[in-house]
Image (tube, grey):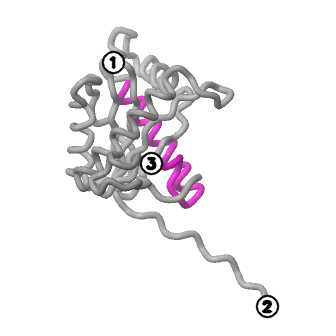
Amino acid sequence: MSKAPLPPPALQRGVRLGIDVGRARVGLAASDPDGILATPVKTLRRDEKKGSDRRVIVREALERDAVTVYVGHPVNLQGRPTPSTEDAVQYATDLAAELERAGSRAGVRLVDERLSTVTAHRQLHEAGRSSRQHREVVDQVAAVQILEQALNMQQSLQQDAGRPVTVPAGESSEGEDVTRGRSDS
């Protein structure tokens, strides 16, 4: 007698955040608790020295009780690393450590962000915004693209999208290796 496969585990209900990491700015988007709608939240000035941009994201995650933070993982069209890849991975790792220290339950996951900024610029152009007006919102729109892609993958796979970010030993509050996120996909 063969057993029927178990149904996939139900996805955890809760807000998810999307992050588009750039050299000068960071875009932030959020979903509703059911993961249906992604909306732009804000554009933050990147602060590599003091990390004030990450502190704002941690505060948003705590206030919204976020369950997952998706950070765009920039790769080229062939899926290979770009000059921005290591920067985004380090940003995601630092953010995961800060969320852990702040007591957030949110896991951080890297998701493929191919063409998110290109798509964001195209959408803004189609909406009648001039190229000069793009700069102030393009990072938010790219963050929405990243989050929408993650939400669509999550619904399709019935599991969290992307790759979990691991907080190295000594960076979490307990001083032990902590994987921020659940299953790999």
Work out how far the residue at label 1 is from the one at label 2, CA to CA, in angstroms: 60 Å
Dot 2 alpha-carbon crowd within 10 angstroms: few under 14, some 14 to 19, many 20 or more: few
The answer to which quarter of the image holds residue 112 is top right
| Disc nearest the viewer among 1 and 2 | 1
Mark 1 touches mark 3? (CB < 8 Å): no
Inter-mark Cα distance, 1 to 3: 25 Å
Q: Amino acid at mark 2?
A: Met
Report the mark closest to the observer, 2 or 3.
Answer: 3
Residue labelled with disc 2: 1
Residue 162 on the magenta segment: yes
Q: Are marks 2 and 3 in contact (CB under 8 Å)?
A: no
Q: Magenta residues? A: 139-164
Residue at left 25%, top 23%? 49
Counting residues from the N terminus, which is met first, the one under dot 1 or under dot 2? Answer: 2
Q: Which of the 4 image quadrants contains residue 88? A: top left
Question: How many discs mark residues in the rendered view?
Answer: 3
Distance Cα–Cα, label 2 vs label 3: 41 Å
Q: Residue furthest right?
A: 1
x and y percent of residue 15 in the render? 33, 53
Disc on res. 166? 3
Q: Which mark is residue 24?
A: 1
Look at the picture and state if 146 lies above or below 69: above
Q: Does residue 71 appear to the left or right of 3 in the view shown? A: left
Viewer-closest of 86 and 28: 86
Q: Earlier in the sequence, mark 1 or mark 3?
A: 1
Q: State the SS at label 3.
A: strand
